[in-house]
Amino acid sequence: MTNDQLSLNIEHCFSGKATQSGVSQKTCLCIAYFNQIKLSGDKVMVMKSFLGVVALLFFLSACESGPANNPVKELFGTQQPDSVYIPDYSKGFSISYYDGVKLVHVADPWDSTAVGQYILVGDEDAPAKYRNSKVPFIEYPVSRWTAFSSTQVVFAEKIGVLETLKSVAEPHYISNKFVQEQLEKGAIRDVGLASAANVEVLLESAPEFIFVSPFKDNRYGQLQEAGLLIINDCGYIEASPLGRAEWMVFFSTFFNKEDTARTIFSGIVSRYRDVQQVVANSEQKPSILTGTLFNDIWYIPAGDSYMATFFEDAGTRYAYRDRSGTGSFALDFETVFHDFRESDFWLITVNHDGKFSKDDFLQMDERYADFQSFQENRVVFSNTDYSMFFEKGIVEPDVILKDLASCFHPGLYPDYEPVYFEFLND
Amino acid sequence: MQKRLAQHFSGRQFTIFWLSGLIILSITLFLFNLIFGSVNIPFWSVVKALVGDLEINDSWRLIVLKSRLPQALTAILAGAGLAVGGLQMQTLFRNPLAGPSILGISSGAGLGVALVLLFAGKIGGIALSHLGWTGHLSVALAAFAGATLVLTLVLFLSRHLKDNAMLLIVGIMVGYAASALVGILKFYSMKEDVHAYVIWGLGSFSTVSWSQMGVLFPVVTIGLIASFFLVKPLNVMLLGEQYAGNLGINIKVSRLFIILCTGLLTATITAFCGPIAFLGLAVPHLTKGLFRTSDHKVLIPAVILAGIAVALFSNLIARLPGFDGALPINAVTSMIGAPVVIWVILKGKNLRTPGV
C-alpha cells in the first residue's frame, strides 16, 4: 500500500470521526498500519483491496455502534423467549428460542459479571431485523466453518457435520481420519497455531464462524478485526465431566442439530448414572493419587475439578476432595509423597511412543518406585499417544467413568476391557 | 563491623575468622535444609533418618533421604561451582559484571534444552512434556551438549583473539544468537512444551536424583579442585595481561584453563539445575566485601563457602515451611542477591574493577 493510500485511509477515519461519535481513531490508524505491514508487494493486490474493504467496513461498523448500549435488549426489548435451554450440567451457556430465531449466550469464562457473548442463529426465513442487527447472525445450514480445537472436531463427528469443516488449527492434535485425509487433499486448510492463526489462509477459507477455546489474553483480536466471527467454546473450563460433554448441545445449535445432540447427551448421562449406581453398591472405596512431577512441580487437581469429580463418581477417596477450587494445586514432591504414599491406586496420563513400561515410568523419576501403588502394580495409565483421552474423552465421560470403575473396583465389571486406561504391569 | 574487627585481628586472623564463620553458617544452613520443608518432620526423626535408623516413619525417612538430602547437596554443588566460575570470569575479564554465564554457556545449554523440549516435539507432532522428559536425563544431556558446543566455540575463538574484551563480546553475541534460535523454536511450539521450557529456565535444585548425582558430584568436585590450581595465574591476571606475560605466565594457556574450568562447572550445573541466575555474579562481590582482599588463595575457598551458604539459604527460602508449593529458585536468588549486592556497594565502596 502506498503512502497516499495510507493517508487516504486515515482521512476516512478522521472524516468518520467528525460525523460520528464514539469511534476510536486509534483503531482506524491501527488498521491502516496493519494493512500496510501485511500487504506490501504486488502479488497480493487482490487481497490488498479486499482487506482494505474489510478494514473500512470494520471502521464503519465501529462508527455506527456509538455509545455502549445493549444490542440484545434493543432487539428483543421485553419480548419473552418461547423456550430456553438451560443446561443441566454446564455453567457457561444458554439458548433462548424466539419465533424464527435462536439466541445463544456464552458467559465470559473468567468474569461472571461481564455480559458475555451473544450470537443469533436462524434459517433463511429469519426476519431481516435479526440479520441486520448488531448481534452476529449465523444462518443454517452452515456450509463453511473452522475448528480451532480437536474437541470441536469430535463434536462435529458425533452430530454429523464434519463435511462442512473447511479449516482447522493445530491439526496434529486431530486424529480423525476423514479430517486428516481432507487436510492432505487441501479441502480442509491448516491455519497453523490457534494462538497465532494465519489470517490470510483463514480469510481465503472464508468460514462463517470459528470455534475457539478462549485465551485469557485475547489472541483473536486480529481475526475479529479481519471481520471473522469468533465463537468462544468454553467447554474445557467446565469442572464436571458431564458439563464438558453438554457443550455438544451448544455446538450443535449453530448447525440446527440440537435434537441429535440432546439425544446423544441424554444417552451419555443415563449411562454415566448407571455406572455411578453400580459403583455405589461397591463396599470398597479405594484411595487414589493422580499426576506426576512436571519438572519439580506436581500439579494435582483441586477438589472441585474435572478429575476430582471423576474420582468421586468412580467411588474412590481422593485426599484433596475437600480442598476447594476447580483448577490444580502446584505442590512439591515431598508434600505429595507424604499425603499419597499409601494410596491404593495411581492414575496417570502419559504420551509415550509405543508401549509404556515400568522402566519408562521410573526414568521419569526414580522416586516413583517408593509409592505403594507402584510397588503393588496399581498404577493405571492412559497413553494419550493412542488412547485419545484428551480428544475424544470429552464426549465419552460415561466410558471414562466405566473404565475407572472397572480399574478401581476389579469385581464390578469382570469381563470389561477398559477403552482409555490400562494397568502398568511390565 | 569490618573496621572494628580489623582493629583486633591481623590480616590472617581476619581471614580465618570469616572463613570459619562461613563454614559454621554453611553447616547450619545445610541442617536447616534437611529439617525444614513443606512436610513437618521433627528434628530427631530427621537425624534418625540420616543415620539409617529404620524405626521411624517410612515416608519421613524417604522424604529426607530421597528428596531433601539430594536437593541440599545439589544446592551446595551449584552454589560453590557457580560462585567460583563467577569469580574466575570477573578476574579474567577484569569486569565486575562478568559471571559464569558471560561466555554464552548458559544460553548454549538453553538452546540444547529447547531443541529437545521444543523442536523434537515439533517433529514427532506430540507434546514432549507429556513424556515426563522434563526431569529426564535427556534434558540434562541436551543442556550439556549445548553448553559444550558453545564452550568449544569460545575456546576455539579464544586462541585467535588476543583481547579478553573481544572474547567477552563474542560470548555475549553467541548468547544472543542462541536466544534467537530458542525464540524461534518457542514461537512454533505447543503450549505444554513452552511451559516446560520456561520452568526449566527458572532453575531448580530438586530435579537431581541420586543417579544423576553420580555425574554432578564428581564433575563439580573436579572443577572446584582445579580452581585451586588456578590461584597463581588468576592472581597475576589481576595485574593485566601484559604484566602477567612479563612475569612468565603463559597467558593463552592460563586463559584456556580458566575458561575450561568455568565452562565445565557452568555447563554441568546448568544442565542439571537450569540456568541459576545471579549466584555467580553476586557471591564474588559479597565475598570481596567481607574479606577485603583480591588474593585468590583466600578468595577461592571463601567464594566456595559463601556460594554454598547463599545457595542453601535461597533453597530454604524457596520452600519455606508451612508453604505447600515452592518458589522457583531463580526468583529467590535474585530477590535476595540484588539488595545485598547494592548494600555491599554502598557500604564498602571497594567494588571497583577487581584488582584495581
Image: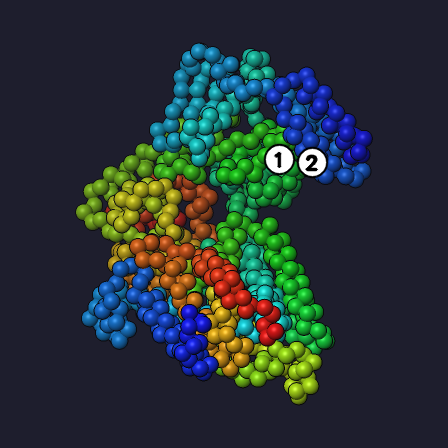
> Which residue is found at the position 26% from the left and 47% from the top?
A316
Q: Residue A183: horizontal and vertical position, in percent?
A: 61, 42
Count how many numbered circles sit on residues in the image.
2
Q: Amino acid at mark 1?
A: Gln
Contact check, label 2 and label 1, Cβ < 8 Å: yes
Image check: A185 left or right of A84?
Answer: right
| Residue B205 visible in the displayed image | yes
Q: Residue A145: horizontal and vertical position, in percent?
A: 58, 32
Q: Amino acid at mark 2?
A: Phe
Mark 2 — residue? A34
| Residue B81 visible in the displayed image | no
A102 shown above or below A384: above
The chain under label 2 reads: A
The chain under label 1 reads: A
Q: Quadrant of the C terminus of chain A?
A: bottom left
Q: Residue B273: horizontal and vertical position, in percent?
A: 47, 65
Q: Quadrant of the N terminus of chain A?
A: top right
> Which residue is found at the position 53% from the left and 52% from the top?
B194
Q: Quadrant of residue A346?
A: bottom left
Kindly state the secondary structure of the residue where label 2 is placed.
helix
Q: Residue furthest bottom?
A: B248
Image check: A418 left or right of B43?
Answer: right
> Which residue is found at the position 79% from the left and 40% from the top?
A41
Image check: A2 left or right of A143?
Answer: right
B1 shown above or below A304: below
Mark 1 — residue? A222
Q: Say yes or no: labels 2 and 1 on the same chain.
A: yes
B156 shown above or below A303: below
Q: Earlier in the sequence, mark 2 or mark 1?
A: 2
